[in-house]
Structures are given as C-alpha cells and as structure tokens.
Image: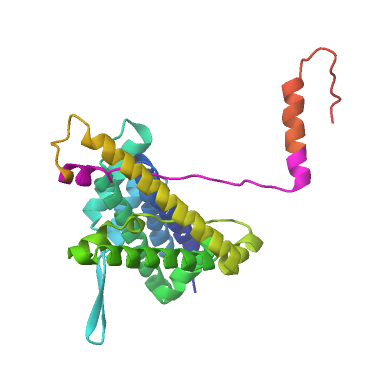
Amino acid sequence: MIDEEVLAAAVIAKQHVHHAGFAGTARQIVAEGYSAVDAILSGLLLSRKIEPPRNHKSKLDRARTLFPNAFSSRVEHRGNSAVYSAGVEWDRIESFYREWLAARYSDFGMGHNDAVQRFHDAGAAVARGIETLALEAGETAEHFDRLVLEKAFGFEFSAADLAVGQIHEKRFAEAERRDEMHGSKLGTKLSETSNFCQLAIVSDDPMTKQILKEDPTIADECADLYEKAIRLVELIDKKRSAELAASPESDGSESFVHEHAPDFFLSIKFRFHGSKTSESAGRFGRLFAEALKGTPGIKFDSP
C-alpha cells in the first residue's frame, strides 16, 4: 500500500521538475531542479518511516546512506532488446545541492548547456526515485508514476499533449523533406526547433483538468499556441543570427553564427488566476476602498 506522505513527496518532486522544465533562467532551473530532488529525498526517508530532517544537507546524507542505489541507471531487457534509463550519481546530487544554495542565496551564473544538464539530472533523479519508491511500496513503477502524474496535473496524457505531439511530428517530416537533397537528415532532425520546445497547460481545478484532458477543440487551440511560440523562437533566432554575424566577436564564418545563435533560453509566461465572481468583486472593492482612504469628503463605514 502506498503511504500518502510518500505519494505527496513524489507529487511535489514531479511539480518542481515540471517548473524547472519551463524555466527561463539557469538560476530558476537549478532552484526548481534541486527542489525536485530534495522532495524525492523526503519521499525516500518517509518510505522507511523516517521523518526527513529540516536541514537539507542532513537529509541528503541520510538518504545517501540508506539508498545508495536509488538513482542508479537502469537497463531493462525486453526480448532481444534493452531499454536504458539514465541515472545520476550521488556525487553529482551533492554538487547540485551546492549550486542550489548558490542559486538561492548568492550571485549565481551558469552556462545554458550546464543548466540543461542539471534539468536532466533532476528529471533522472525524480524518475529513478519514483521507481525506488514504487519498489519500497510493492507497486509497479508504471502504476506509481501514473498516480503521481494524475495527482500532480490531473492526467498522464491529455488531448493537448497528443495535438502538440502531432505538430512536432509534422515539423519533423517537413524539415526532413526540405533538406532531403542535402544529405544531412540527422543534422536536420537534431536542429529542428521543436526538439527544444515544450508546452504545458496546467490547472488545479478538477473540471478544468477534465476539459484539458479530453476536449479536442481546446487541444487544437493548444497546438496552435505551440506552433506560434515556435515561430517566435525562430524569429528571435533569426534576429540573433543577424546581430551575431555583425558582432566584433564573429570570425565572419557561417559556422560561428550557427554555433551561437541558439544559445539562449526563452520562457513565455501567461496566467489566469480566477476566483468566484463574488470573491473577485469583494477583493477589488477592498482594494478600491484602501486606495481612497484619507480622501477628503469620502467616508467608509467599517463592515
């Protein structure tokens, strides 16, 4: 049976790694990424009925002692084939922890490639950690992960996920056809912009989650949004290319521009924070009353 506290820790970890995946800065990736690892460490200790220490380094050390192989790489053999799942070494987890402290409390800088690797480290730690938690609970990793995803986001896969995936496949096929004559299909596949882009629509409301999960019209709108965001990235890349070509650092070669143009992060943030109409009206009323306090000739009676 799955302990509710253990499940909650895994859900928090999954949400933190999700936030890291949509970060616009290296600092944010590290801050959210290690927070995901830290939540998994709590889950590991709770699975053995141990209260996680409030000191994060103590928590790391305790989990490392009790679960030396928690984040190890996995190889699953299926008939004549094998599936490899990346892990992360404890020494890397420890250096990740030190970077997390720096990202939260001091001046912090990290290259884009290193930040992306930290995101992958966080994802690997959460994935392997969930497998370890499933083993501790006597559950399959697939069942446990599905429970975590449903609690964290409301679904494992949504109609929007499928629609966005179709856009990626379409762009992939178009790029392959476009460059077919140049004999560089692999290079085209690797450099396709959608390989580096992701879209997620998240809500905490059960009714809205169900709509996102199933509604084909909403899914099409999400796919539209995804495609427009990719075009924005490509436009920025094009403008960066022009500026890089004319920059003093450029050696005048096309390879210099090709190397440096995509070296940037971009995160597009949009939110809708709604509430009941009566609650919104009350909140705005209070703000309005506060703004007018002290205005001559205007008096507000206490509620």
- On whether residue 39 falls in the magenta region, the answer is no
Residue extending farthest top? 296
Residue 38 in sight: yes
The mark tally for this picture is 0
Q: Is residue 70 in view from this perspective?
A: no
Towards the viewer: 36 or 153: 153
Q: Is residue 80 left or right of residue 150?
A: left
Q: Nearer the viewer, residue 125 or 269?
A: 269
Residue 106 pos. (x, y %): 33, 31
Q: Position of residue 199 (x, y in %)?
A: 45, 56
Q: Nearer the viewer, residue 303 or 17?
A: 17
Decide: is 84 above or below 205.
Answer: below
Q: Is residue 153 above or below residue 254?
A: below
Position of 275 with respect to 18 (left or right) is right
Magenta highlight on residue 275:
yes
* Color encoding of the figure: rainbow
Q: Which residues are magenta?
A: 255-281
Can you tell which quarter of the image residue 151 is in?
bottom right
Q: Residue at x 24, y 55 (%)?
A: 90
What residue is shown at x 51% (from left), y 64% (from top)?
160
Q: Is residue 45 left or right of residue 76?
A: right
Residue 51: x %, y % from top left: 44, 55
- Quarter of the picture holding the C terminus: top right
Asked if residue 240 is positioned above or below residue 52 in the image, the reply reads above
Q: Residue furthest front?
A: 181
In the rendered image, residue 215, in percent from the top left (x then y), is placed at: 60, 67
